[in-house]
């Protein structure tokens, strides 16, 4: 790569480009699992999550990625869940977290050839 | 002989206090600088958390003062002083009235949003305040951008002029959070194709039905709440607005275009109240509102015996608490008068 020869490279901006992001998954989830709408990012799900205790996996963060349409992060994170379901017990708003994960995985599988 | 109370300001607090003082057997003079009573409520279409009409509450207050309260409208009281145990107030026109007690119900001013220049109020045409939006909803059932187009996305900015040390207002204005939720729902009801966003730092849903309204906004109306304070707003060539904000829950900056921006302006103490207070010797608190003798136990009493305060002249309040505070002030004033001027 030419930029490597010169010893520098262009850093990609860190902006969440809201207008360019594709939020199809979020709109699908809002129809199929409406409880996604009432998450208020309290973090109970991640606090109780055994995967989060050992690795940098955060379900509350995934919820935000879904809402903003940050597809790369969703795809990177979603399979780290072990489906134990503790998050669903901890959620004070009764969000069906397991169903959100299942629909998301299904959606990504169908979309990726 | 009946005691006479001079109430300055015929907004919610002044009107309700007048009705209560009258019911307790006092003579009441109610001064109002505008031609009609009602204060800020006159410009408000619907009220949180039920979306009932502001005019209904106004009708209730008008009925309360009826024809027995002497409403002296179109009159600005510019000075007040104590003379041998009685109070004398003077209007800008030089008219003089005497009374046995003074109740300050002079209310608040809305924060001047041009002071937060980074949001572009007064510079970009599609940046409006929450009060502007309410006035537009009051007079028309249509909401269009400055170019006459249907907006596709509207964003609300919380805490404009509140909780802002740099602007000089460290206090929370209390009502803007839930007003934004209410207005975002109204946008979604009026324009089903328009997205609504709220940019907040904290959501203070402290009242009965407030949290429920917030849940309803998300669940039923699809309003999106993003935690972060907007740093700057710039105008695109088509007059839409590019906003920059940190999505603090994700921890990354965000860029978004919106068609209209609504600034949730807070309460500020009025300059005319400060002048009148200085004139009569009433102290102000560190935020510039009228200082209560004791926030817990003597909230309607000022440092000057015989001068009382009610409503938003003392602190930001909702309509419900203003009405309660006005009734409380009426009892306090009445007790003071009946005890022969002892606190």
Image (tube, coloured by chain):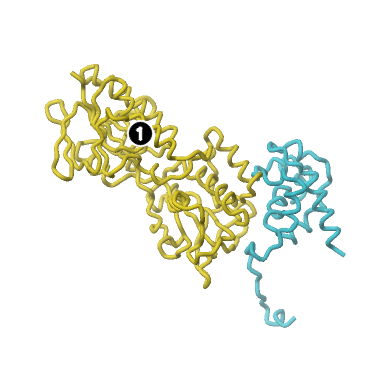
Chain colours: A cyan, B yellow
Does residue B204 sit above or below B1 in this rendering? below
Residue B145 placed where, x, y %?
50, 62
- Residue B16 sits in which quadrant? top left
View extreme (top): residue:
B339
Residue B112 placed where, x, y %?
37, 54
**Residue named by callout 1:** B62
Residue depicted at x 43% and y 48%: B162
Does residue B336 sit above or below B198 in this rendering? above
Residue A19 placed where, x, y %?
64, 64
For the C terminus of chain B, the image quarter is: top left
Residue B92 seen in this snapshot: yes
B27 to the left or right of A98: left
B73 to the left or right of B184: left
Residue B303 seen in this snapshot: no
Does residue B81 sit above or below B171 in this rendering? above
A19 to the left or right of B266: right
View extreme (left): residue:
B84
Residue nearest the viewer, comparing B326 with B169? B326
Residue depicted at x 32% and y 32%: B292
Asked which secondary structure carries label 1, the reply is helix
Q: What number of labels is visible? A: 1
View extreme (right): residue:
A113
Residue B240 placed where, x, y %?
53, 66
Residue nearest the viewer, comparing B239 with B54? B54
B167 to the left or right of B281: right
- Label 1 environment density (alpha carbons within 10 Å; few <14, some 14–19, many ≥20): some
For the N terminus of chain B, the image quarter is: top left
Name the chain letter of the residue that bears numbered label 1: B
- Residue B57 sits in which quadrant? top left
């Amino acid at each position: 790569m030419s930029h490597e020869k010169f010893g520098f490279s262009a850093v990609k901006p860190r902006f969440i480009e809201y207008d360019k992001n594709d939020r199809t998954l979020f709109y699908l989830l809002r129809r199929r699992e409406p409880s996604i709408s009432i998450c208020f990012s309290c973090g109970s799900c991640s606090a109780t999550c055994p995967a989060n205790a050992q690795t940098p996996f955060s379900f509350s963060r995934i919820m935000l990625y879904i809402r903003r349409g940050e597809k790369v992060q969703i795809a990177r994170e979603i399979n780290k869940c072990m489906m134990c379901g503790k998050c669903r017990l901890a959620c004070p708003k009764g969000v069906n977290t397991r169903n959100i994960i299942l629909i998301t995985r299904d959606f990504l599988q169908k979309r990726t050839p | 002989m009946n005691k006479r109370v001079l109430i300055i300001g015929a907004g919610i607090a002044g009107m309700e206090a007048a009705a209560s003082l009258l019911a307790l057997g006092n003579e009441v003079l109610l001064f109002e600088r505008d031609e009609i009573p009602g204060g800020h409520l006159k410009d408000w279409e619907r009220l949180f958390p039920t979306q009932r009409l502001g005019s209904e509450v106004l009708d209730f207050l008008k009925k309360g003062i009826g024809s027995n309260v002497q409403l002296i409208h179109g009159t600005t009281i510019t000075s007040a002083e104590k003379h041998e145990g009685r109070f004398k107030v003077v209007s800008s026109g030089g008219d003089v009235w005497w009374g046995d007690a003074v109740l300050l119900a002079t209310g608040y001013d809305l924060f001047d949003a041009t002071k937060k220049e980074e949001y572009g109020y007064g510079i970009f045409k599609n940046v409006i305040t929450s009060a502007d939006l309410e006035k537009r909803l009051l007079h028309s059932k249509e909401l269009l951008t400055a170019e006459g187009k249907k907006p596709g996305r509207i964003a609300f900015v919380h805490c404009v002029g509140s909780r802002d040390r740099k602007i000089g207002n460290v206090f929370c204005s209390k009502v803007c959070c839930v007003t934004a939720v209410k207005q975002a729902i109204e946008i979604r009801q009026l324009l089903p194709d328009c997205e609504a966003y709220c940019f907040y730092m904290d959501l203070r849903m402290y009242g009965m039905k407030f949290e429920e309204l917030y849940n309803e906004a998300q669940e039923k109306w699809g309003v999106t709440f993003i935690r972060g304070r907007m740093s700057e707003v710039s105008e695109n060539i088509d007059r839409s607005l590019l906003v920059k904000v940190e999505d603090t829950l994700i921890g990354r900056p965000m860029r978004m275009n919106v068609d209209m921006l609504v600034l949730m302006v807070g309460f500020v103490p009025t300059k005319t109240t400060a002048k009148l207070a200085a004139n009569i010797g009433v102290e102000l608190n560190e935020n510039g509102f009228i200082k209560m003798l004791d926030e817990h136990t003597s909230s309607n009493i000022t440092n000057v015996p015989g001068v009382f305060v009610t409503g938003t002249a003392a602190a930001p309040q909702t309509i419900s608490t203003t009405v309660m505070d006005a009734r409380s002030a009426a009892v306090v004033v009445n007790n003071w008068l009946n005890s022969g001027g002892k606190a």
